[in-house]
Image: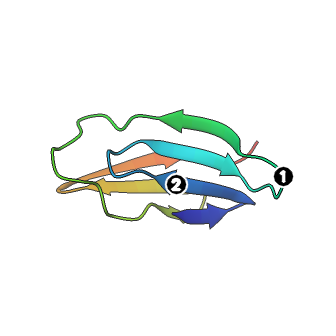
Amino acid sequence: MAVADNRIYYRTEDGTMLLIEPSSKEYLERGRFEQPDRTRPPAWAHPVIANGKLYVRDQDTLFCYDVKRP
């Protein structure tokens, strides 16, 4: 899990990425996507956010997504 711009970036063991807005009243999921080219082992590497980019590692593969707010 990582937090940036008041959003939670949560990665499940199966590789699904979730974008969650923190709320004390309810679960607010703002987006999700399945990682392409998923390997078999569980995904334990934490997502990293730096300079408006989301980095997701899976074994020997690194994905980078632009997550800057407009």
Question: Within the image, what quadrant is residue 16 found in?
Answer: top left
The residue lying toward the viewer, choosing from 64 and 43, is 43
**Of residues 60 and 43, which is closer to you in this image?**
43
Report the mark closest to the observer, 1 or 2.
1
Residue 64 is left or right of residue 32, and the answer is left
Q: Nearer the viewer, residue 28 or 54?
A: 28
- Where does label 2 land, which residue? 10
Residue 25 disc label: 1
Q: Residue most toward the front? A: 25
Residue 53's place in the image compared with 70, above or below, is below
Name the residue located 75 percent from the left edge and 56 percent from the top edge.
22
In the displayed structure, does residue 21 sit left or right of residue 58? right
Please report the residue visible at 55 percent of the width from the left and 65 percent of the height from the top: 2
How far across and how far down the image is residue 33, in percent? 47, 34
Q: Position of residue 26 (x, y in %)?
A: 78, 47
Residue at 40% in and 34% down: 34
